[in-house]
Amino acid sequence: MITVLCGGVGAARLLRVLRHADAATQLNAVVNVGDDLVLHGLTICPDLDTILYTLAGLNNDAAGWGLRDESFRVMDSLETLGGETWFRLGDRDLATHLYRTHRLAAGATKTMVSAELTSSLGVDVALLPVTDDPVSTVFQTAIGPLTFQEYFVRHRHAVAVQRIEVIGAALARPTDAAIGALERARRIVIAPSNPLISIDPLLRVAGVRDVIRRRRDDVVAISPIVNGTALKGPADRLLAELGYDVSCVGVADVYGDLVGTWIIDDADEQHANALRQRGHAVLVTSTVMGTPADDARLAAAVLS
Amino acid sequence: MITVLCGGVGAARLLRVLRHADAATQLNAVVNVGDDLVLHGLTICPDLDTILYTLAGLNNDAAGWGLRDESFRVMDSLETLGGETWFRLGDRDLATHLYRTHRLAAGATKTMVSAELTSSLGVDVALLPVTDDPVSTVFQTAIGPLTFQEYFVRHRHAVAVQRIEVIGAALARPTDAAIGALERARRIVIAPSNPLISIDPLLRVAGVRDVIRRRRDDVVAISPIVNGTALKGPADRLLAELGYDVSCVGVADVYGDLVGTWIIDDADEQHANALRQRGHAVLVTSTVMGTPADDARLAAAVLS
């Protein structure tokens, strides 16, 4: 059993690579819910859905978000009505939000809904929200506080961030399923997701960091910064804005003593010593997923 | 200024006929909200939307409900996820529900949302929910209590009804806009909507019946039962089940002393005396809308 700490896209791709390389190992995804939002009355869980769609083979790999064969009939009509459409929800995607909102109103938890959705779509990775309680990542920026989607989608992460807060994290309880998956896994993997806005909000949920720290020797982490840039999204910019080195070393500083082994890219070999000096074991391989050979090397490093 | 008491389809068609016959008169629609529901977290107002779509020229006249050029991408995907799809919401229709739910969450009333939607779609009839408070029509049936949509859509109104209740009606306050439209109109028209499940729930909102009774001489009503059958829906069946005559006379008995003048169809002329004996004036004309000539006759009768 392997448990992966997950944001969205980077984690989804890693899980797909791991599942492809090894069909037998039980995979658990403990997933950030700090980006979750209620829009038009619908509860939307972007990271959970990105992973769900990717593992179900429904995602739009080219666009990097959303579903294949997606249409926007609802949004087009909403635009005609003068509604808010900056967060463009596709028709197929909307079905997921209707399903979840309906089930939550009937008393189900996000954990239960995730289990139902993975079952319906034939996904054999356990999708575990880190908490079923409300948490909300907020960005203190040069233009005032922004919710996650306001920062990420509406402003396309092009405003300077001064501080990131996770409202509710201190009072949120991690789910038994998430804690169990962290305690019982033979290995905990920190996915190459954004360390500051995906993984750290997850770690701030009360108790999660402690469980992982106790498992330090079994924790491997993969840097989303390769050769000084983020593979996707604003991780590089945010690291710089918040005073971290824009490299795998900066990411290691975010996670501190939680990580036993860093898996870094061949392109970052020059950082291996800095990581060892911080007390980490280091494994150098390919961490950029995309080709079968690179995927296989990364999977071998994570699973070995 | 003319104010029409409205359910869904029958009222929408009457309003369209009146607007077509007379572009100058201000038309107000005071609309039933007893069928309103929250589904998948979305607030849906079937009667308001039927009127909105019909007056905007967007409705599917052939089907009798929903929008033209409608698609069901969201529902098809929701079906794949194992969600509840017995109430099939089209993609274009969903946009209206997203818009309304978003605005209600932001503190708007149904009245405000209706004004925004009519403005966006270029509809020049004032669409006035009878109340902004929650009311809910419930059917006590042979198989237990059913909500409006369970009765109407899920069971296709094919179960015997013993009693109709409107939960919340006694505590609901009619809106100032609705009361104003009833007090100031030169004529109040009761549309040929279902008397028991569309008009009566509206009349049960505290205070509405009293305002209309004071205007009795200016109240005209059009029967939805012509020649012993309902033009659409279960009005005939329900009248029989609840002990009323299945005719315009039975409908007149539902409304009692609220109505000054009954407008009945040529096919129902034999009932004119029974209506006069009950103290109503009677006007015989065509009440079945559809041809330009019939529409013009009906409009003339209502507007004269």
Image (spheres, coloured by chain):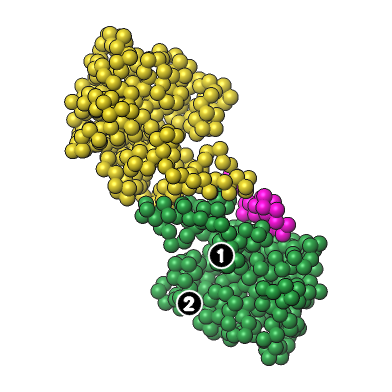
Chain colours: A yellow, B green
Magenta span includes B111: yes
Vertical relation: A23 (above or below) B202: above
Looking at the picture, which amino acid does disc 1 mark? Trp
| Quadrant into which the N terminus of chain A falls | top left
Magenta range is: B102-127
Q: What's the chain of the residue with tag 1?
A: B
Q: Nearer the viewer, mark 1 or mark 2?
A: 1
Vertical relation: B136 (above or below) A270: below
Q: Which residue is mark 1?
A: B65
Q: Earlier in the sequence, mark 1 or mark 2?
A: 1
The image quadrant that residue A32 belongs to is top left
Q: Position of residue A251 (x, y in %)?
A: 36, 18
Q: Position of residue A165 (x, y in %)?
A: 45, 27
Q: What's the chain of the residue with tag 2?
A: B
Q: Which residue is mark 2?
A: B161
Tag 1–tag 2 contact (CB < 8 Å): no
Give the residue at x 40% y 35%: A61
The image quadrant that residue B202 belongs to is bottom right
Q: How many marks?
A: 2
Give the residue at x 40% y 13%: A245
The image quadrant that residue B146 belongs to is bottom left
Left or right of residue A301, residue B68 in this image: right
Give the residue at x 18% y 38%: A24
Left or right of residue B159, residue A277 in this image: left
Looking at the picture, which amino acid does disc 2 mark? Val
Mark 2: few/some/many CA within 10 Å (<14, 14-19, 20+): many
